[in-house]
Amino acid sequence: MELGMVGLGRMGGNMVRRLRRGGHACVAYDRDPSKVAALEMPGAPSLADLVAALRKPRAVWVMLPAGAITEECVGELGRLLEKGDAIVDGGNSFWKDDVRRAAALAEKGIDYLDVGTSGGVFGLDRGYCLMIGGSPEAARRLEPIFETLAPGRGDVAPSPGREPGTAEKGFLHCGLAGSGHFVKMIHNGIEYGMMQAYAEGFDILKASAKVAASMADVAELWRRGSVVGSWLLDLTAAALARDPELARFEGNVADSGEGRWTLEAAIEEGVAAPAIASALFARFRSQKDHTYGEKLLSAMRFQFGGHVEPPARA
């Protein structure tokens, strides 16, 4: 299948590489030509050229930071594309923006899919977990793309008793416009809480005179047979093995928006979410002074997503 990719940052470039490995044809565009050159493939010098290079019905995947830059890109693509074409937003856009964009593009007959994408800098080899919102017909048309980007079944057995579907392959159509990014928003809210729990636990261990073992050894121990084992703990252990004192991190932990949006949804639905709220507020506090736990949070974010710390506030 053929796909246009806009945005070749930490994830977009690797997604193109994975798609090409899977036999798909890609046309790439980034404002920075060096990112296209790094893929060792022809690139489009503009969005208009990217659209012109694709065969109809066209599909363009936007992998840009949420906010104005994505809004501008989707708007321009909406003017360039035609009936039967599709736009995919694979970033972390706010789900209500997806509902608005999908309605506007539907007037021109252009499909809009919001795809929450998880996998970070490891997605090239591990694959990406994809949470898809939008037209079921458009989602089915792009299924070969989703199937290649997703991890596949691998060695993770499906849960006993469930009906077969795409979820065990690592991608799922979650509902109409906005639902993909809504599910990803909640996913990231849960991530906030999990990371905070690890950070607080290791902070207590680090402060206690009762524990002679290193934090790196404790993390390595818990990877084996422990009920708190996870990929996130694997990444934590890797970070601690490289830098036990986390000297390279200040502990200034950014909140990228999804935690706030998750709490807004909790309030709208009348659902208590104290763990996620506490994790978000801890990130606010980290921007003023820093504990060992906050350094560990920052190390985890760098480990799975390549996220660097924001500049210190005056």
Image (cartoon, helix red, strand yellow):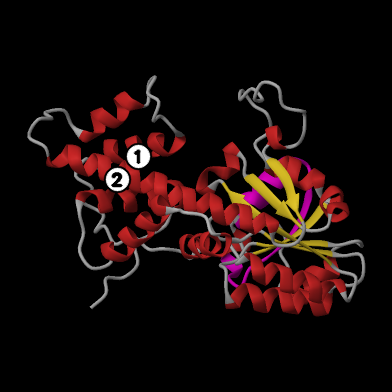
Determine whether the residue tagged by mark 2 lies in a helix, strand or loop. Answer: helix
Viewer-nearest of discs 1 and 2? 2
Q: In x, y percent, where is residue 57?
A: 91, 61
* Residue 15 falls inside the magenta stretch: yes
Query: Where does residue 201 sit, x and y in percent of width and height?
Result: 26, 40
Residue under pointer 1: 236
Taking depth in this image into account, of 52 and 199 the one nearest to the observer is: 199
- Residue occupied by mark 2: 199
Q: How many marks?
A: 2
Query: Which residue does the image show at 61% across and 23% down from the upper left?
Result: 155
Q: Residue at x 57, y 74 (%)?
A: 67
The residue lying at 69 percent from left, 57 percent from top is 179
Q: Residue furthest front?
A: 270
- Horizontal relation, residue 36 to residue 20: left or right: left
Asked whether 178 or 45 is in front, the reply is 178
Question: Tag 2 or tag 1, which sits nearer the N-term?
Answer: 2
Say what amino acid the circle numbered 1 marks.
Thr
Quadrant in which the C terminus appears: bottom left
Can residue 190 be found in the magenta stretch?
Answer: no
Q: Is residue 219 above or below residue 185?
A: above
Coordinates of residue 2 in the picture (x, y in percent): 82, 54
Q: Image check: 299 left or right of 96?
A: left
For the residues marked 1 and 2, what is the alpha-carbon distance in whole angstroms?
9 Å
The residue stretch that appears in magenta = 12-34
Category of crowding for the residue at label 1, using alpha-carbon neighbours closer than 10 angstroms: few (below 14), some (14–19), many (at least 20): many
Compared to residue 99, the image places residue 227 above or below, namely: above
Q: Residues within 10 Å of mark 2 (few under 14, many from 20)?
A: many
Q: Amino acid at mark 2?
A: Ala
Inspect this view and state whether residue 14 appears: yes
Do we see residue 46 in this rendering? Answer: no
Q: Residue at x 46, y 60 (%)?
A: 259
Question: Please, what secondary structure does the residue beneath circle 1 have?
Answer: helix
